[in-house]
Image (cartoon, rainbow, N blue to C red):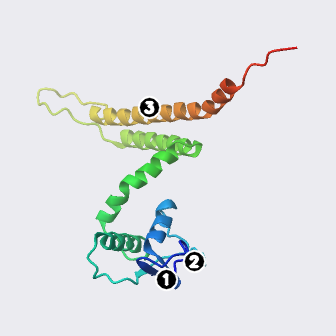
Amino acid sequence: MHCPVCLQMASFPVQTNCGHVFCAPCLMTYWRHGSWLDAISCPLCRQKVSLLCPLFNDSRSDQQSEIVLGEITDYNKRYSGAPRGITDYLCDAPFLLLLLARGLGTRRGLVWMFLFRVALCCVGTVVSISSPTLENLSSSSTHRESHPHPSLWGLLGLLDDLVVVILLLICVINVNQQMAPEMEGAGGIPLQTDAA
């Protein structure tokens, strides 16, 4: 069996749900270099590959065979439609957080951060208005407090300040990224002198 990707004899051959046979390392490399959020498309027929079936003998005891089988199992867990455990989602968390961080650096991300801040302020306002006033617990004082608990204000204030600082940093980074090519272009233009 020849792999249509590397045009060699298929090492660790796997069959896709559409019936095509490839090298497992070729498909795994194709998957790792593409979008991890979606199943790959078959390189031959472009159908979504939701299941990989190993065609090699899994009784081989070498380390590379175990690594390839682990990658195939990981792929099948993600895209075969079978339920995934919480630990699988936790293992994906760093990658998803990296994607989220990259997305926040765009203009669309800034808009979403602003909307999140507005929503957070609205929730804080609703909570502060609807929370009952707290009675002073000391028996010597009959005075009632007319303000919500100070720790609630502190937490909301801290979250608001944190969001503002993050938005400010993202704006500065965006401005720097937009100005960097302009600065390089202006600095790289040689001054013309009249030699005539």
Badge 1 density bin: few <14, some 14–19, many ≥20, Cα 10 Å: some
Q: For the residue carrying disc 2, how many other residues have a C-alpha within 10 Å: few (<14), some (14-19), or many (20+)?
A: some
Q: What whole-number distance in Å separates the C-alpha atoms at marks 1 and 3?
A: 48 Å
Considering only vertical position in the picture, is 155 above or below 63? above
Q: Residue at x 53, y 30 (%)?
A: 172
Q: Quadrant of residue 46?
A: bottom right
Percent x, y of residue 110 = 54, 41
* Residue 77 image-quadrant placement: bottom left
For the point 25% across and 36% down, the residue is 134
Q: Residue at x 38, y 37 (%)?
A: 159
Q: Which mark is residue 17?
A: 1
Question: Does the rendering let one see residue 149?
Answer: no
Q: Nearer the viewer, residue 133 or 3?
A: 3
Task: Give the alpha-carbon distance from disc 2 to disc 3, as whole Å.
Answer: 45 Å
Viewer-side label of 2, 3: 2
Amino acid carrying label 3: it is Val
Q: Amino acid at mark 2?
A: Gln
Callout 1, which amino acid?
Asn
Report whether residue 184 is seen: yes
Is mark 1 in CB contact (under 8 Å) with mark 2? yes
Please give the label number shown on residue 165: 3
The residue wearing badge 2 is: 47
